[in-house]
Image (tube, grey):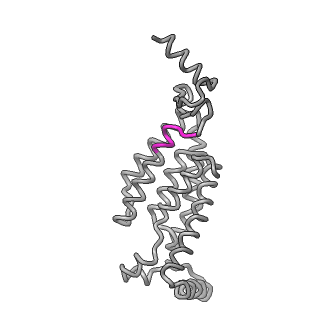
Amino acid sequence: MKRKLFTALLYCRHGIGKFIPCISLSQTKLSYGGDSIGLRYYQSLLLLLLLLAALADLKTDRIPNGFVLFGIIMGVSGNLWNNLSLRQTAVSMFLAFLLLYPLFKIGALGAGDVKIFMMIGSFWDARALLTVLAAAFVIGALCSLIKLLAEHNGRERMYYFWSYISEVVRTRQWKIYGEHMAQDYERYRKNKIHFTIPVLFSVALRIGGVI
């Protein structure tokens, strides 16, 4: 039985039977006809976690801390299993916090967005994190543009943005962006972009090898 399994894995490794999908147990990587598509088990878990986080964000505007903590534990465990040092993981998580915390302080991002990227940092090294982060902001910008065009409030949003910048320059003090809209929940919901959606798409593109 063991010999047959070993032989089957060898066939799989060398691409015999091009149209037979197989799983390499040694590399925990899904492959098709010997060609890896780069989807590891813990990356599949990351996609699932981000999908659930996006659904929670859409429904409640919140991402539970316990959910993020579970994701970080799984990410760190996966990295250790794949020989990525704890130091590299810590650097990646700290980098996510360092880059996004200023945006949280001015209200451009929510606390949940910062925590989600720290969770992503627990799965990947700093280089992959920066790639995903950059792509998420590009996708987020495109989503914002589509939303502005769909709701025909581009002039209002630009006026508010430049008023905010002028106020910051005049007072020389950072203020929370959109704090006036937060008092009107319906208006706040109308103008908000749930950043977990661009993050989900960005991670999917990274795992798929597009970016």
Q: Identify which residue, 101 or 61, lies in the foreground.
A: 61
Q: Is residue 171 magenta?
A: no
Q: Which residues are magenta?
A: 38-45
Q: Identify which residue, 98 or 38, lies in the foreground.
A: 38
Give the vertical position of 189 relative to 153 (above or below).
Answer: above
Q: Is residue 44 magenta?
A: yes
Q: Position of residue 26 (x, y in %)?
A: 55, 25
- Point 48% across, 46% down: residue: 46
- Point 50% across, 13% down: residue: 4
Give the vertical position of 84 relative to 94 (above or below).
Answer: above
Give the vertical position of 18 relative to 205 (above or below).
Answer: above
- Point 40% across, 46% down: residue: 70
Residue furthest to the left: 60
Q: Identify which residue, 68 or 144, lies in the foreground.
A: 144
- Point 63% across, 51% down: residue: 210
Q: Position of residue 44 (x, y in %)?
A: 48, 43
Main SS, magenta region, reads helix
Q: Position of residue 86 (x, y in %)?
A: 56, 39
Q: Is residue 107 left or right of residue 16?
A: left
Q: Is residue 186 left or right of residue 168?
A: left
Work out which quarter of the rendered image holds the N terminus and state it: top left
The mark tally for this picture is 0
